[in-house]
Image: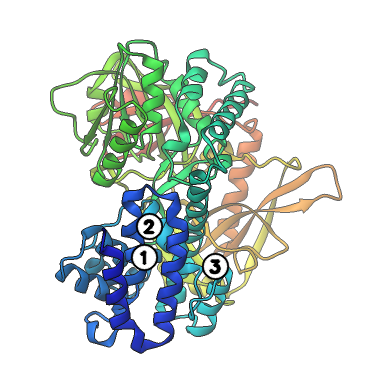
């Protein structure tokens, strides 16, 4: 007989019974965990129920070391020889890593492994739906109790601003895993959802390629996203599923949206027998690529994060692709060992530059498909060699989690607060010419509005071409993020995109105003701050009018010029965006 759960209960009672409600909460959590554990394989049920009994023992005064209960409880359990999975579940229960980060204990907390498995989801669901006295709670009840109990500026509410959406997802997944176990959700439901996804893809003539559609019809996407993800999300062609977050809550790994995976596969011009390198792993896209290139093709997927590659390998094996896809843990900024050459390289993380390793590993007639950041916009480019540079044959606006490792690009950020206490974040690829004090003073002063006479139609929201025009023509273009209602974006001014031009003595945001009383929709404009705010706003207006006069171009010719490319390649009126390994050359076709 397995004694793990009785031992856990006895230990929890020893430490928590003297603490009254803390013991009652542990009992309620363990009871709820036992109910939800029916959705787990039998060998995992006792593990998570034991962790539910023990999750709060670090609150016992005699176990205090760091002052943070998840760490203190896990330290004691580890020293007493408890199974590592139980120890790690206790350390990381209910998003504890976010509060550890807020408390300055991230390094101590990182000693304990975090797997982000159905066990973690289940323990979070059990804990966060059990009240202080063990009574059944809703998650919203818990959040209300946290807000009432803790000062707004303390570590707990700050951490929960990050943890709340992630824990909501965990609760949904835990409940769905139970529904799978009880037969309320079945593989037939997944097959139906997958068929509907393929039909939606097929309805788009740009994506309706037989080999690509056959791959999507075959590979079970729901088995590559976190277990318990609603099928409506798993098979939504527009939805990327986040699979890993950093300690600030930012996603660092995901399963991309199906429409974008289809578009990138088509841009790579894949054929049966091709050799494909995928940079940025997750498993699902690699399985799709394996179906497209067939049994005589080769698919290699590489990622710098061992957690990601271990997860990828596990999911590929579970779905029958373990022998068809090679998984490598490495930094793809560097060439793979063995001088390997590929017919296609598909990058599934946001890249700021194109290292020479990618072009060196690309066959002469091969395609490099990469989401390349150009200023504040990212486009998935399909690039081919032409002489000694790369030329984009297709371009698609997109968004990806950023690259990690050597090729990671850290943008410069500056955080200030406006007079109403609303946060403002400025972001740039280069060092901004103003400091936070200067920006704060400018936000407190008068601002100047200017209007361009350039209007856009109602419902026109894709202005990515205009923003790339602004980025390429104005080196001082940056991001300016702030909630509506503050000094940057008062209610009467609608924000186009969180963009601004920053100079040494002023800055100006890009805005628009409603012209619904006419047929023109919205008028684009600028709002300037600082001593020379009117001049900065005027520069923005000049750019808008130049874009309009040029015929509102949206798609420039895009080339990538390596550092050793002769300068003559960029003389043909191209605008250059400087990168580490070379330049992006943008040539705008102007229509007078």
Residue situated in front as seen by the camera: 475 or 88: 88
Residue 567 figure quarter: top left
> Are the two marked residues, 3 and 1, in contact with CB atoms closer than 8 angstroms?
no
Cα–Cα gap, marks 3 and 2: 16 Å
Residue in the image at 44% along x and 52% along y: 38
Density class for disc 3 (Cα within 10 Å; few <14, some 14-19, many ≥20) is: some
Residue 418's mark? none
- Tag 3, which secondary structure? helix
Residue 41 place in picture, x, y as percent: 37, 47
Residue 139's mark? 3
Q: Is residue 505 visible?
A: no
In the rendered view of the protein, which quadrant contains the C terminus? top right
Residue situated in front as seen by the camera: 536 or 233: 233
Residue 93's mark? 1
Question: Please, which residue is most extreme toward the right here?
Answer: 517
> Are the two marked residues, 2 and 1, in contact with CB atoms closer than 8 angstroms?
yes
Q: Does residue 216 appear to the left or right of 494 in the view shown? A: left
- Tag 2, which secondary structure? helix
Q: Earlier in the sequence, mark 3 or mark 1?
A: 1
Residue 120's mark? 2
Residue in the image at 21% along x and 81% along y: 65
Q: Earlier in the sequence, mark 3 or mark 2?
A: 2
- Tag 1, which secondary structure? helix
Residue in the image at 62% along x and 39% along y: 462
């Amino acid at each position: 007989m397995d004694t793990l759960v009785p031992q856990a209960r006895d230990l929890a009672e020893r430490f928590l019974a003297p603490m009254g409600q803390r013991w009652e909460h542990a009992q309620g959590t363990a009871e709820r965990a036992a109910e939800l554990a029916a959705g787990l394989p039998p060998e995992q049920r006792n593990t998570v129920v034991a962790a539910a009994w023990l999750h709060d023992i670090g609150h016992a005064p005699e176990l205090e070391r760091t002052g943070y209960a998840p760490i203190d409880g896990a330290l004691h359990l580890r020293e007493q020889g408890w199974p590592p999975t139980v120890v790690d579940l206790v350390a990381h229960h209910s998003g504890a890593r976010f509060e550890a980060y807020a408390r300055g204990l991230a390094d101590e907390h990182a000693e304990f492994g975090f797997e982000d498995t159905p066990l973690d989801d289940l323990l979070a669901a059990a804990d966060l739906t059990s009240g202080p006295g063990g009574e059944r709670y809703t998650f919203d009840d818990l959040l209300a109790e946290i807000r009432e109990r803790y000062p707004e500026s303390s570590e707990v509410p700050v951490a929960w601003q990050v943890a709340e959406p992630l824990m909501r997802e965990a609760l949904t997944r835990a409940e769905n895993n139970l529904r799978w176990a009880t037969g309320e959700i079945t593989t037939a439901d997944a097959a139906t959802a997958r068929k509907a996804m393929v039909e939606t893809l097929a309805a788009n003539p740009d994506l309706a390629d037989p080999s690509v559609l056959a791959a999507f019809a075959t590979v079970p996407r729901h088995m590559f996203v976190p277990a318990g993800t609603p099928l409506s999300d798993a098979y939504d062609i527009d939805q990327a599923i986040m699979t890993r977050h950093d300690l600030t809550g930012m996603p660092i790994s995901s399963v991309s949206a199906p429409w974008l995976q289809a578009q990138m596969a088509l841009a790579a011009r894949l054929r049966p027998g091709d050799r494909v390198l995928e940079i940025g792993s997750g498993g699902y896209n690699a399985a799709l690529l394996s179906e497209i290139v067939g049994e005589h093709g080769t698919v290699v997927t590489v990622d710098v994060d061992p957690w990601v590659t271990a997860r990828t390998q596990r999911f590929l094996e579970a779905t029958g692709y373990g022998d068809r896809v090679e998984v490598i843990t490495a930094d793809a900024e560097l060439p793979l060992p063995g001088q390997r050459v590929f017919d296609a390289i598909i990058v599934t993380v946001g890249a700021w530059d194109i290292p020479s390793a990618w072009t060196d590993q690309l066959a002469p007639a091969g395609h490099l498909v990469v989401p390349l950041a150009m200023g504040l916009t990212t486009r998935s480019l399909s690039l081919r060699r032409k002489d000694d540079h790369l030329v984009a044959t297709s371009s698609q606006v997109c968004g990806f989690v950023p690259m990690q490792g050597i090729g990671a690009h850290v943008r410069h950020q500056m955080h200030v607060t406006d007079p109403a206490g609303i946060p403002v974040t400025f972001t740039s690829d280069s060092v901004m010419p103003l400091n936070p004090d200067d920006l704060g003073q400018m936000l407190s002063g008068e601002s100047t509005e200017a209007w361009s006479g350039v209007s856009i139609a109602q419902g026109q929201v894709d202005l990515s071409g205009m923003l790339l025009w602004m980025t390429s023509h104005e080196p001082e273009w940056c991001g300016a993020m702030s909630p509506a209602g503050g000094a940057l974006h008062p209610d009467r001014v609608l924000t186009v995109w969180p963009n601004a031009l920053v100079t040494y003595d002023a800055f100006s945001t890009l805005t628009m105003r409603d012209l619904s009383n006419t047929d023109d929709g919205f008028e684009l404009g600028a709002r300037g701050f600082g001593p020379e705010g009117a001049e900065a706003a005027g520069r923005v207006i000049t750019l808008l009018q130049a874009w309009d006069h040029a015929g509102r171009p949206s798609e420039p010719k895009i080339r990538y010029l390596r550092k050793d490319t002769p300068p003559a390649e960029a003389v043909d009126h191209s605008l250059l965006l400087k990168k580490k390994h070379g330049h992006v050359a943008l040539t705008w076709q102007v229509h007078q």
